[in-house]
Image: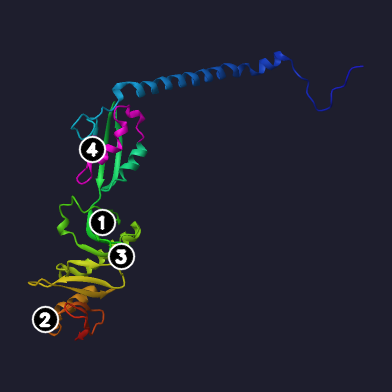
Amino acid sequence: MAKKRPVGTKPTGGIRETLRDVRPYILPLLACTFAVLAGLVIHQRAERFVTEDTRFAMRKADLGEPHSPDLAVSGIRRTSLAAVRQVFAEDEGRSIYLLPLADRHKRLVGIDWVKSASVHRLWPNRVAVAIEERKPVFLVNLVPERRGAPVRLRTVDESGRVLPASGVPELASLPLMAGVKASLGTEEMAARVRLMNRVIRDLGPEGKPVSEIDVGDPDNIKLVYPIAGRQKAVTLFVGESQWRQRLLKFLHNWPEVEKRMPNAVKLDLRDDGIIGAMEFEETGEEQSGN
């Protein structure tokens, strides 16, 4: 007695029927497989060619040369050329195809004076580096955390990046920012730079003789004002605002203040009606005058 097929099922076909169903897909599949394999072989050979052929290699620097003759560097004024060369030292003598652009860029912007940089391969074997340098805006006296340690003189740019003071031709013309702790981070240093700029703008032309601005305490800015014709400077406590107004008060009243308190070296201008002497050159006595 013949077995009955379960209800809802289709009869199974033979091998011929199966081959007939997949035959249209076999040739395209084989073609794709061949194309992928051929592409891999071509890619491997091409990669080997540009990696090992000496025509793609950046030449090594000869004795006395600042860097490889195949390394072009532009935009440098203060940046150490030796520091730039060191970034690419391991690339000399090998193909520029192996040059890790992202890593070299990261190392370049870590150099003191480098604000931004671009690195490009110039086939067959040259590398071009363009650098934009940081611009120092102020001299800064960095106050050490450890008592008794020397104050370090540096420069700082608009972003708060602390830079060396050496190798800056315009060093003498930069305003001096004082009272800043060496432990400040870049963002906090940038805030002090912005405060310094606001003070300078507010003081206007009357503030040009000021030799030093202490922004260590934002609630009490201090100005060092040299006295013309004398080997003396007076420190002015001008508070958190109205800096120009208080400086003008000092300039207007200084002849009288000097007569009454000739040894005063620190004056408090924060009280609108009073000029108070906080420290004297020869005595520790405290006085105040109108």
Mark 2 nearby-residue class (10 Å; few <14, some 14–19, many ≥20): few
Q: Is residue 158 above or below residue 218?
A: above
Q: Residue furthest right?
A: 1
Disc 1 is placed on an element classified as strand
Tell me the kind of residue under disc 2. Pro
Q: Which mark is residue 255?
A: 2
* Mark 4, residue position: 73
Image coordinates for residue 256, horizontal then vertical, percent: 12, 83
The Cα–Cα distance between marks 2 and 4, rounded to whole angstroms, is 57 Å
Q: Number of labelled discs?
A: 4
Q: CA distance from mark 1 to mark 4?
A: 24 Å
What amino acid is found at the position of numbered circle 3 in the picture?
Arg
Residue type at the position of mark 1: Val
- Report the span colored magenta: 72-100
Q: Point out the tag, 2 or 1, that comes first from the N-terminus.
A: 1
Query: Mark 2 touching mark 1, by CB under 8 A?
Result: no
Q: Nearer the viewer, residue 14 or 251?
A: 251
Across and down, in percent, residue 27 comes to 57, 16
The residue positioned 33% from the left and 56% from the top of the image is: 186
Q: Calculate the distance from the C-alpha at mark 2 to the C-alpha at mark 1.
A: 36 Å
Q: Nearer the viewer, mark 2 or mark 4?
A: 2
Q: Residues within 10 Å of mark 3 (few under 14, many from 20)?
A: few
Q: Residue furthest bottom?
A: 290
Residue type at the position of mark 4 = Val
Compare marks 1 and 4 and give the one earlier in the sequence: 4
Disc 3 designates what residue? 147
Q: Which tag is nearer the camera, tag 3 or tag 2?
A: 3
**Circle 1 is placed at which residue position?**
156
